[in-house]
Image: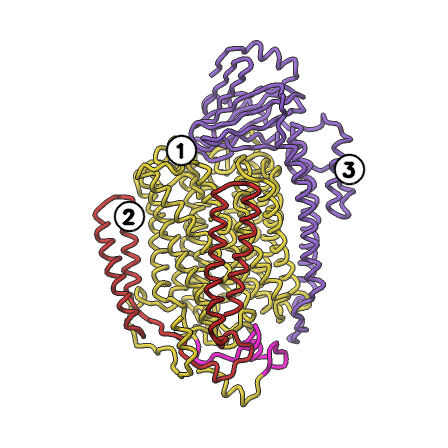
Amino acid sequence: MTLLEQKGEASAHLPVEHHQGPTGYYRWLSSTDHKVIGKNYMYTSLVFMLIAGLMAMLIRTQLASPNSTFVSQQTYNELFTIHGSMMLYLFAGPFAFGGFANYLIPLQIGAPDMAFPRLNALSYWLYLTGGITMLLGFFTASGAAAFGWVGYAPLSSSTNSPGAGPDLWIVSIALVGFSGIFTGVNLVTTIFYLRAPGMTMFRMPIFTWNMLVTGLLILIAFPVLTAALIMLYADRHFGTHVYSVKGGGSPVLWQNLFWFFGHPEVYILALPFFGMVSEIFPVFSKKPIFGYKGLVFATLAIAGLSTGVWAHHMFTTGTVLLPFFSALSLLIAVPTGIKIFTWIGTMWGGQLDFKAPLTWAVGFIVAFTMGGITGVFLASPPIDFATHDTYFVVAHFHQVLFGTTIFAGFAGFFFWFPKLTGRMYREKLAKLQFWLVFIGFNLTFLPQYLLGLRGMPRRIAVYATTDHFTFLNRLSTAGAYLTAIGFVVFLVNMWVSWRSPIKAPDNPWDGHALEWATSSPPPSHNFHKVPPIRSNRPTWDMNHPEHADGRVMTAAELSREVLD
Amino acid sequence: MKFEHKLYLGLGVFFAVIVAIYWFWSGESGGSTLILASALLGLVPGAYLGWWAMRMKPRPEDLEDPTSEESTGVVGAFPTYTIWPFVMGMGAFMIGLAMVFGSWTLVIGFAFAISAAISVTLESKRGGAV
Amino acid sequence: MKRSTIKTARAEGNSPASRRVRWGAKLAGLAVGSVALAGCSPAFGAYRGATTQGRSTFHLFQGFAITAIFVGGITFGLLFFVLLRYRKKSDAIPKQRHSNVKIEILYTVIPILIVVGLFFFTVKVENKVDALNPSPNVKVTVTAFQWGWKFYYPATNTTVIGSIKHYPQLVLPEGETTAITLVSQDVVHGFYIPAFNFSRYALPGFVNHFDFTPTSAGTYIGRCSQLCGLYHSEMLFSVKVLSAQQFQSWTSSQAGKVTA
């Protein structure tokens, strides 16, 4: 509150200017600039994504033929466990709320930094060390954790999964969990207290809105996971019986706690990416977002409903209230549908310029719509009984999560790449990557729906020739390899952009939000001048006064209003 | 400030309604506790923000059309470089590893974490750029 | 039994066709303009369900699939129309439309109506699938363990135990109701019979009850669907549905026996 009281006093004190600061590695280790931390998060999570992607290739190679012995069953179980854990805990979330949000939120609301820069730096170090801890599991005698990314009790107990690998998994997620909580606190505080003058809540860009809601969801969900993990650790080492039947505990409690985290987590992963495409569609259509308030309330509705749907992962336990969870799960399709129609409405009547960001964003809509529709099937308990824990579910959540984190994620990455680096990526390579990944992705996951309906359970290392799963699995594996080639193209793109840079202008796309009003990359405290904010498109208003949304200022007013 | 207050309060009320329905329909205590906690997570900060919203003028970021006089003021002091978060992170890492391997790293871990906590507190007490 | 002898038999036909059409038509009513599809009753890749319960689930699935094709068709239709129609043609700035309240209400209300419809049929089928017959013809206790299944018939004191080397067989009578009691000895397993469109967790410390009324004789594969450790993928079993008389003679021949 001191901050607010100070603001009331009309002193013309400005954010403290930089000292020269340290240099070299020490500069990197000690930086609290949200832009440096954001980029660290982004690049680290992309590396984790590539490692987990390689594990996916091993998994798909194993499943390419029946009775496969490419890897042992133990290794296979470790691979899908760490693949899932890395993608969900180390890539999808941190890429969005650690990387994009950290970098963009202060820029979009006209703030000099995040509210708690030191806490922000700590978040990153906890995240990095947590990630390393998870990978360490492969180097222990007992191998990495092998009980799936959900770690169901009592399979994760010390009798069923002894050794250091599972403990490393627990510690890793606890570290990453604390990092997430700190980032959540930081996001909410920054958005509530550090907005520039005139940036009312309903003028914030949709991305910022989505990150605010994500921050709140993190605060609801992550502490539950951390608590559940601490109890799991206590069960394993201190002889407590929270999740074991013998001591009067309940294995289903783990499932309840885990999914109370796990389902909001899905939206923690998805909402930031919804926010990214909500920034991209308007810019490349040269139009404002369609139905801004509807979109904001849809986001809030998703947040509210998402905490009341966790047990739809537990329909087949026979321990949950089916109609309640089914109703709320079905209902969540409504705000999600609103978002899809909003994006189509934004493009309607526009001038669609198919640069790489828009192409990737359209790919996202296609993938996400398919994944969303099949999600409605799974919200119905009887259909879930038939498809639970089969490849139908695997295909569904990969379409949703791959659709959001990769398609929307790369749309955002290419969209903000000029801002991040001050350089342009190579358009043709980005498009080539899109087509390889898009075709590969659909070839990988569409056959899996059919596999699931034909009765192939998830997480099985081998299947028999007589199961008739071979052909569809081969298609799926071929698709996965194609996707992998797409990522090689991405690495080439990055290499070329690094070795022979093309300088990016400050506002290459005619962007709408505040981040496009500063230089590329932005100066250390983000803005030399914050333009007046009288609508949710301040940069657009400045560049297109004849089409402005907000009140257009006179030249005399401008010279007074613009803040230094 | 008013809207932030309403946002939190709205979420809190929504969860309160959900927990009421869920508790009376299912009688399941675990999930009810968790949603109740979520309701409090909305209501407590919501009440706090509301209390402040009543006591202060709208901030410049709450105004539709703030004048340049209303827009000036201190935004805050932001550190630019400090090594202590890194030290604290490494301390947490070592404590974590000690939880798995049960070794002497626990001592180093706590030494790192505690010294970093003290230093970072002193640093922010001094204020300004560090 | 060896894995190669377990067939993934399809359970089709054999049911009162009139009822299928009636159900299909009802559910198709959810999706306006797709009633025509109901007559030919496509399976969309799913099992048609070899039990009365599984069949209800299948019809629900069909209804959902038709609705999904309808909704997906509209969404993708709109999307591709926009992508083709509004490609950039000039540098002119288009009309800056912010919202259209009527359209927004439309795309909020219609999905709500669809969802309410889907929920209505879901609850209906769910009650049917979860219904327990107070006087079942046969009772079987299924115990899951790492890594195999045990089937116990209390009426005749018959036990069948399997392992990953030797898959056990669950024998059920056709047209009669079998009440299954499902428990686990160690970790969480998933009792999953794809052809029955049904799975249920076997939980340690919690007993699950459900009924099967098989409608067509045959042999079906059963699997563990929930990861349960190292040999999860080999925790298979088979289900053999016999006619009522054949089942009678089977139980009397197996009375008191333990097959491992």
Identify the amino acid type marked 3: Gly
Chain B colour as displayed: red
- The reply to whether the magenta stretch includes residue A540 is yes
Coloration of the structure image = by chain
Eye-nearest disc, 2 or 1: 1
Task: Give the chain of mark 3.
Answer: C
Q: Which residue is mark 2?
A: B97
Q: Is residue C194 visible?
A: yes
Q: Which residue is mark 1?
A: A248
- At mark 2, the secondary structure is helix
Identify the amino acid type marked 1: Gly
Eye-nearest disc, 3 or 2: 2
- Give how far apart the Cα atoms at labels 2 and 1 are: 30 Å
The picture quadrant where one finds residue A162 is top left
Q: Which chain is yellow?
A: A
Eye-nearest disc, 3 or 1: 1
Tell me where the magenta segment starts and ends, as one range.
Answer: A527-552
Q: Which label sits on residue C39? A: 3
- At mark 1, the secondary structure is loop
* Label 3 crowd (10 A; few <14 / some 14-19 / many >=20): few
Task: Give the chain of mark 1.
Answer: A
Identify the amino acid type marked 2: Leu
Chain C colour as displayed: purple
In the picture, measured across the screen, residue C64 lies left or right of residue C154, that is right
